[in-house]
Image (cartoon, rainbow, N blue to C red):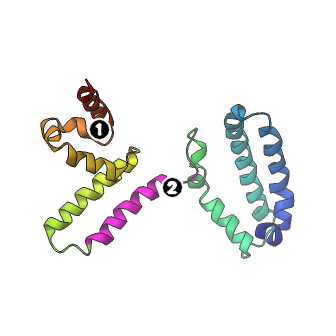
Amino acid sequence: MLLMESQPGFCRQFLLPRQRVVVINTAQGFQHVTAFLGKVVHHLMTELHQWLEAQLAEHKTEPNSGLGKAISYLLNHWPKLTLFLQQPGAPLDNNIAERTLKKAILNRKNALFYKTVNGAGVGDLFMSLIHTCELNGTNPFQYLTELQRHADELRQKPSEWMPWNYGDTLARLATRAAA
């Protein structure tokens, strides 16, 4: 609502008419939404770029105003801001990468409290195991518990006890025990 209040002309002129087009056309069905939105977004971004350039070129917006500075920023960074249009299905954000980096930063902060280099190595090992489990949809606590319960089997065939395949190994062991 803040944008509508602060820049009513921009919203009335550019955003609202285009928003209706997307909403009306996407109501046709979920299967068509992705393909449709890819085309619409590319078209809308082209229109937006032309509109932004016209605002500054035709002096419709003061370059030193808040909107003028925002338009200048967008135009200066346009190639980087529109990279997502070049790859179908590209995410509009980098949340996955940021979540991954959060783990490394958390581990770095925790490392400040290790008393020895060996303790830091053990902490790094467990952080890596926990994060690998999370990436593979495995409960880290259950995984580490099963490693402890099956230490002998783990020593014999460690490749069967990775976070992504240890469930199959457990099922195979349960089948043998039941037979």
Give the magenta-colored segment's residue range: 92-111
Give the numbered dot on residue 166: 1
Picture residue at 84% right of the left edge, 48% below the top: 20
Quarter holding the C terminus is top left
Picture residue at 15% right of the left edge, 72% below the top: 116
Where residue 15 appears, x then y in whole percent? 80, 56
**Residue situated in front as seen by the camera: 20 or 70:** 20
Quarter holding the N terminus is bottom right
For mark 2, give the secondary structure: helix
| Cα distance between the residues tagged 2 and 1 | 28 Å
Asked whether 93 falls inside the magenta stretch, the response is yes
Residue 36 lies, with reference to residue 55, above or below; the image says above
Picture residue at 70% right of the left edge, 44% below the top: 41
Asked whether 3 falls inside the magenta stretch, the response is no
Q: Residue furthest front?
A: 178
Residue 171 lies, with reference to residue 113, above or below; the image says above
Instruction: From the viewer's perspective, tell me whether residue 170 is left or right of residue 74.
Output: left
Would you call the spot at circle 2 few (<14 residues within 10 Å), some (14-19), or many (20 or more)? few
Across the whole image, how many numbered discs are drawn on residues?
A: 2
Where residue 79 appears, x then y in whole percent? 58, 52
Where residue 29 appears, x then y in whole percent? 75, 33
Would you call the spot at circle 1 few (<14 residues within 10 Å), some (14-19), or many (20 or more)? some
- Specify which label sits upstream in the sequence, 2 or 1: 2
**Residue situated in front as seen by the camera: 131 or 11:** 131
Residue 40 lies, with reference to residue 110, above or below; the image says above
Picture residue at 37% right of the left edge, 60% below the top: 103
Residue identified by numbered label 2 = 95
For mark 1, give the secondary structure: helix
- Residue 39: image quadrant is top right
**Residue situated in front as seen by the camera: 41 or 75:** 41
Mark 2, mark 1: which one is toward the viewer? 1
Q: Amino acid at mark 1?
A: Tyr
